[in-house]
Amino acid sequence: MSIWEYANPKKFMQSSAAVLPWVAGLSALCLVTGLVWGFFLTPDDYRQGSTVKIIYLHVPSAMMAINAWAMMLVASLIWLVRRHHVSALAAKAAAPVGLTMTVIALVTGALWGQPMWGTWWAWDPRLTSFLILTLFYFGYIALWQAVEDPDTAADLTAVLCLVGSVFAVLSRYAVLFWNQGLHQGASLSLDKKENVADVFWLPLVVCIAGFVLLFLTLVLVRTRTEVRARRLAALLARERLA
């Protein structure tokens, strides 16, 4: 069996219908477990106090904001190379979800930054590149809406996605590229010294799993809606020509 079989709309609708309830259920389980565990069952940090618990929303949403763009990039490249419509529709479906994640990350980051840094916002390299990535999300969504022909819209948004990927990379690795800035390094790392304490790390991992599964759930739902909308548009076009 080839993975490209799932690019067929019919095959995608069948397989996603079977997978979706499981992904949604696991997402709800991980989110409820992780957020309850993190917000109510972990202690306050000795330096940051209760504000440290924003980590359970901020870190997963920021990770998914960047990874959503990465997923859109892969789907866009598949569309440009192989012209599979499901991949283009999946990229389109992921954009509003990714934008929502960026907004959550920006808001929670401001709420966390104010007591820690003494300011709601700083033109830190990571924060600035993340804000630009947010603007690219808005532009990507607007471009889909502005272009009437769906294939042309898919081509143009795929190019925009390629350009915006620069800022997705900068958002992820700005702390490594520039030593200056207020933003701390990674909360999760292969280097155990850089990780947060286990009492915070364990529920954070569960929250991240929940956000990943939530993203997959929403993208599957929205992609299925886009496929149905494309089918409906094709049927209406045939009726007009008949």
Image (tube, grey):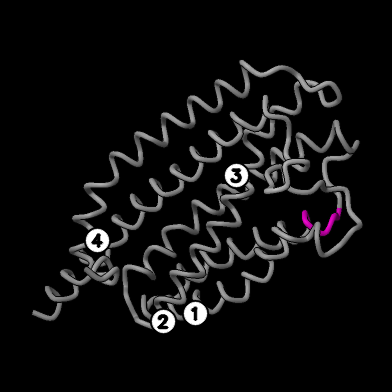
Give the distance between the C-alpha atoms of the residues marked 4 and 3, in whole angstroms: 27 Å
Q: Quadrant of residue 55?
A: top right
Q: Nearer the viewer, mark 2 or mark 3?
A: 3
Q: Are marks 1 and 2 in contact (CB under 8 Å)?
A: yes
Residue 132 pos. (x, y %): 71, 62
Residue range of the region highlighted in magenta in the rendering: 123-127
Residue 103 pos. (x, y %): 63, 47
Q: Nearer the viewer, mark 2 or mark 4?
A: 4
State the SS at label 2.
helix
**125 in magenta:** yes
Q: Amino acid at mark 4?
A: Phe
**99 in magenta:** no
Residue drawn at 42 percent across, 82 percent down: 80
Give 205 or 120, whichever is nearer the viewer.
205
Q: Quadrant of residue 48?
A: top right
Please report whichever mark, 2 or 3, sits nearer to the chain's N-terminal start: 3
